Image (spheres, grey):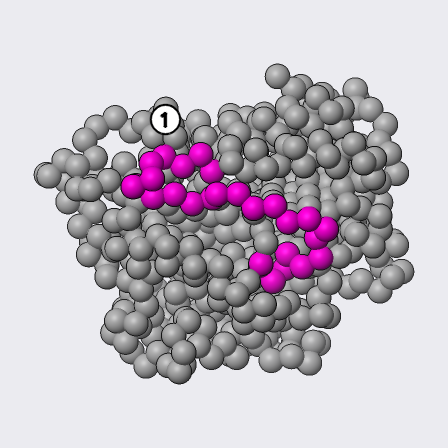
Amino acid sequence: MVDFPAIEGAKPVPDKPNILLIAIDSIRADHMSCYGYDRLTTPHIDRFAQSGTLFENTFSAHIPTTPAYASMLTGLDCFGTQVVALRHKGPLRAEAPTAAEIFRRYGYNTTSVGFKGNPSSRGFDNYIEFDGWGSYATGRSPKAQNLNNATIPELERLNAEGAPWFVTLRHMDPHAPYLPPEPYERMFYHGDECDPNNRSMDPVLSFKPFGDFFKSWMPPGISDKDYVIAQYDGAIAYMDACIQSIFEALGSMDVLDNTIIALNGDHGETLYDHELWFDHHGIFDNVLHVPLIIRYPDRIPASQRLSGFNQHKDLLPTLLDLAGLADQADADGYQFDGRSLMALVDGDASSFESEFYITECTWMRKHGWRTPGWKLMIALEPDFHFKPEIELFNLVEDPNEDNNLADERPDVVEALRARMEAWIQKREAETGLTNPMLTQGDWHGTKGIGAFKSSQQAYDTLYIGDLSKAIRLQAQSREEE
């Protein structure tokens, strides 16, 4: 097994280190054992984290995948990218250079694995795809091994060429359908998932917009929600084992210590929380809070955990800093909304913004303001879960966000709303661009409807359908391009 040596034993690195971004779709930080989960889901990532720095409070401010990656790979917030919707129309704006474009300019060979078609995937030299889905009919889905089969030969090819490389991987295992291969299916569950006396899945399967999609990959007769949650955890554990193969490959190529490795989630996942059912919409913390672990022995301390707040927009400035390219990027006119996390790593700052703007435009269109103590969520149109327009949560006393205090604390609602609106006005003035949350039109994919007028209309209109339709929804952004 590859060893992660202490910093004292690290080898000297070349002028331009390789960069590997392990991006994981739908990964909840609180379902990883290195983030305190009581199930041992990530033993290999845990060990990897011990050789690097783990950031305890990284947030995906813009949900879902499309805007999350846009911030991650441009260093910009949603005002800079103008991307907020899953079904973003058209390409990323030209004024937002991507990580691939920047690193190519500085002599890197670039490859994307599993990320073709996303607006922020612009600029890679090579695009490699793999099967990252699955269904009950087709059996258990080895998503991460499929990714490895595509990735490891590409890493070997890139290393043989001799130039530094930037590779982005998009892992799909924690993304529904959750179909981990044996023995991971039963690693965290022993029981009868179809017990007729267990009715916990009744509301899930009766939710019309998602019901047929769930039935396309869950076992017929499924009744126990805990089985489905165990599949999610099993998928993480299976992916963790496959990621170890990538670490082993880098070690065998003798480039492990010469490679900046960042493991980051695009967003989390709702399981049985908040009646949102096994998806990643909403702006509760189970979706906003994501893992970030960085390893680079030349500059990143081992066994360090940092509690300071940070966001996706800070990732690209950090990678440029670690690669020794920050000054050159600044001289070349690249500007970012984020900052290098080395300020936290080196102790020059204890935290970045502790309160920030949050958005979601997946199956609902909402925005809000999160502080360390409070979360305000405001619906910009009625949602298909029939939730109230305004939700307010005390994150200190109610960290699971179960008790809406909007009616009891209108003073807090107005204070947070004022701070949010002041920040929006500031960003509009700085960028000269309208808040993209207000310019989405038919964001939901049904042409000609515009904003929903009622929750019932939203419920009757939105429909994932079967697995094939879900895959098409993920691909819509590339179709627009």
Using the image as rendered, state which of residue 458 and residue 354 is in the foreground: 458
The spot of residue 162 in percent (x, y) is 83, 35
Q: Residue furthest left?
A: 197
Q: Position of residue 179 (x, y in %)?
A: 37, 38
Verify whether residue 110 appears in magenta: no
Q: Which residue is mark 1?
A: 182
Looking at the image, residue 338 lies above or below residue 34: below
Instruction: Look at the image and say whether residue 120 sits in the magenta stretch.
Output: yes
Residue 46 seen in render: no
Q: Which residues are magenta?
A: 117-143
Q: Residue at x 40, y 82 (%)?
A: 448
Q: Residue at x 77, y 33 (%)?
A: 159
Q: Of 279 and 351, which appears nearest the observer?
A: 279
The percent coordinates of residue 105 (x first, y second) are 83, 54
| Side (left or right) of 115 relative to 102 | left
Q: Residue at x 39, y 34 (%)?
A: 180
Residue 274 location, quadrant:
bottom left
Dot 1 crowding, Cα within 10 Å, few <14, some 14–19, many 20+: few
Which residue is at 43% across, 59% downward? Answer: 472
Three-letter code for the amino acid on which mark 1 is drawn: Glu
In the displayed structure, 251 sits above or below 288; it is above
Q: Quadrant of the N terminus?
A: top right
Instruction: Identify the main secondary structure in magenta.
Output: loop
Q: Secondary structure at mark 1?
A: loop
Q: Relative to 193, is 93 above or below?
A: below
